[in-house]
Image (tube, rainbow, N blue to C red):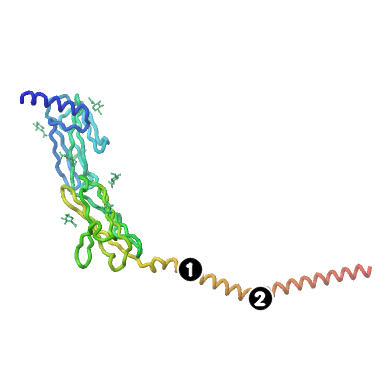
Amino acid sequence: MGLGLLLLPAVLALLCGREAECTDPDIMTNAVYMTENTMILTCNLSANSFVSGHRWLKGGKVLKEDKDTSNIMTYNVSGLPEEGSGQYICEFLTTPNVSKVVNVSVSPQVHHYKATEHGNEGDTGVLTCKSSSFPPVTDWSWYIVSPNGVEAIGNGSSDRYVIKSSGNQTVLRIHNLDIENDQHDYTCNGTNELGAKGDVVHLHVRSRLAALWPFLGIVGEVVVLVTIIFIYEKRRKPDEVCEDEDSATGALKSNSGANHDTLRQRNSN
Ligand SMILES: *[C@@H]1O[C@H](CO)[C@@H](O)[C@H](O)[C@H]1NC(C)=O
Ligand SMILES: *[C@@H]1O[C@H](CO)[C@@H](O)[C@H](O)[C@H]1NC(C)=O
Ligand SMILES: *[C@@H]1O[C@H](CO)[C@@H](O)[C@H](O)[C@H]1NC(C)=O
Ligand SMILES: *[C@@H]1O[C@H](CO)[C@@H](O)[C@H](O)[C@H]1NC(C)=O
Ligand SMILES: *[C@@H]1O[C@H](CO)[C@@H](O)[C@H](O)[C@H]1NC(C)=O
Ligand SMILES: *[C@@H]1O[C@H](CO)[C@@H](O)[C@H](O)[C@H]1NC(C)=O
Ligand SMILES: *[C@@H]1O[C@H](CO)[C@@H](O)[C@H](O)[C@H]1NC(C)=O
């Protein structure tokens, strides 16, 4: 037992020397919400070692550093609950450097890209939900919200539904879309150790014909234009041709007349 107690600090010192995210027992951490969106993190180093500065890190990036010698360091977290959540590291620059991880955890912040998603009848509808908050979502589920109530979509409860979930994202594919059966609100629901939260997306299913309408409209416009041009040309052509012929023959006549005259003059000469 005595030996164990003697060895413990040595083992911890070894771990701290090698790993940046080493957890030092001499650092007390505290996280206090100031508002709904802001929080103050505090690390308090109780060991009596000389401090030459502090660093706050998150996701491998340095958020803040200073050269204060205080044994207390604080950081103001903003952007809660979403971007602000995550794993923060407070590091005291001592010999060796010591640090501790401070988890800023929130219930899952779940989002769908758009409030409404569109799909054509017979095609595959794709609904995607994401969560970038900490801790990560461990379970995803999808529900159909219809006037009949809320119905869970099991993966494989019907061949038409396929759910693929990976960490911070879940994708629901609905094959062979049908206007009557699939045009609903859908809820994606993410769960982590702090709770569950969802987002709603409306799926709008367009009929095949509706998808064709813009195309038919353009075709119709082209047909009308071509017809108008055709009729106009038909009505215009005979007049123009007559005029052209008149002037052409007139010019010819006068030319030939002039030629005749010169010829006659030459002949008479
Ligand atoms: C920091 O820790 C020391 C010793 O554990 C304690 O006396 C002191 O009150 C703490 N300071 C703060 C601001 O929590
Ligand atoms: C952090 O927040 C506290 C309390 O809201 C405030 O007094 C302090 O000035 C803030 N510090 C910075 C660097 O914004
Ligand atoms: C402590 O961290 C600082 C800043 O990254 C670095 O310059 C220094 O070499 C580190 N000291 C030790 C003993 O690892
Ligand atoms: C911080 O979060 C990580 C990952 O979820 C977890 O393994 C670790 O135990 C947490 N640490 C604390 C002090 O809650
Ligand atoms: C989701 O996770 C992947 C890989 O783990 C990452 O590249 C991506 O940026 C994450 N997306 C969000 C919204 O957090
Ligand atoms: C759902 O089923 C598909 C195909 O069977 C599979 O690839 C996918 O991983 C499953 N998703 C979940 C969340 O079980
Ligand atoms: C999400 O799922 C959890 C458990 O899986 C449930 O308790 C909660 O009511 C669901 N939330 C929504 C919005 O569907």
The residue pinned by badge 1 equals: 219
Task: Write the residue at 69% across / 74% down.
Answer: 243
The residue pinned by badge 2 equals: 239
Callouts 1 and 2 close, C-beta under 8 Å = no
Residue 36 coordinates in the image, percent (x, y): 17, 48
Q: Which dot, 1 or 2, sits closer to the camera? A: 1
Q: Nearer the viewer, residue 92 or 140?
A: 140
Quadrant position of the C terminus in the picture: bottom right
Residue 240 left/right relative to 63: right
Residue 18 coordinates in the image, percent (x, y): 22, 28
Tell me, for residue 245, which label it has, or none. Answer: none
**Does residue 154 lie above or below 66 as drawn?**
below
Amino acid type at mark 1: Val
Q: Nearer the viewer, residue 58 or 129?
A: 129
Residue 148 left/right relative to 208: left
Amino acid type at mark 2: Asp
Task: Write the residue at 15% across / 34% down.
Answer: 43
